[in-house]
Image: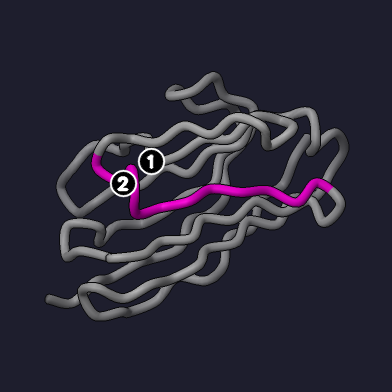
Amino acid sequence: QVQLVESGGGLVQAGGSLRLSCAASGRSFSSYVMGWFRQAPGKEREFGAGISWSGGSTYYADSVKGRFTISRDNAKNTVYLQMNSLKAEDTAVYSCNAGGIVPYPGHYWGQGTQVTVSS
């Protein structure tokens, strides 16, 4: 079992930055592929970014590539999403996920954190 809690969402102007954090509790965090997914109003949830268990490999959706950076600290059981050059279309609920196979989610989800980008 893994419990995931996101933080760091909020309201930011277009062009600004935010860093999301996802703190995990439970065993074997370092063995899980971790991912960030997002769901905008009226749209399907979509893959944003993923990272291998070691952090050595990262994966991004085309829509965020070059602007977002995923990282993890296994000693702190935490995964991060640094979001730069934010656009209005990045507005969504961002959710952390564990145990998936990129770009598909695994079984474990956080509750989500709202990111709103004003234009």
Whether label 2 touches label 1, CB < 8 Å: yes
Quadrant of image for the N terminus? top right
What's under tag 2, amino acid-wise?
Val
* Vertical order, 10 against 76 (above or below): below
Q: Residue at x 31, y 46 (%)?
A: 64
Residue 29 figure quarter:
top right
Which residue lies under the disc numbered 2? 64
Mark 2, mark 1: which one is toward the viewer? Answer: 2
* Vertical order, 81 against 106 (above or below): below
Magenta segment range? 63-74
Which residue lies under the disc numbered 1? 48
How many marks the image carries: the answer is 2
Q: Nearer the viewer, residue 29 or 87?
A: 87
- State the image coordinates of residue 36 (x, y, percent, origin top left): 48, 44
- State the image coordinates of residue 88 (x, y, percent, origin top left): 16, 65
* Vertical order, 69 against 61 (above or below): below
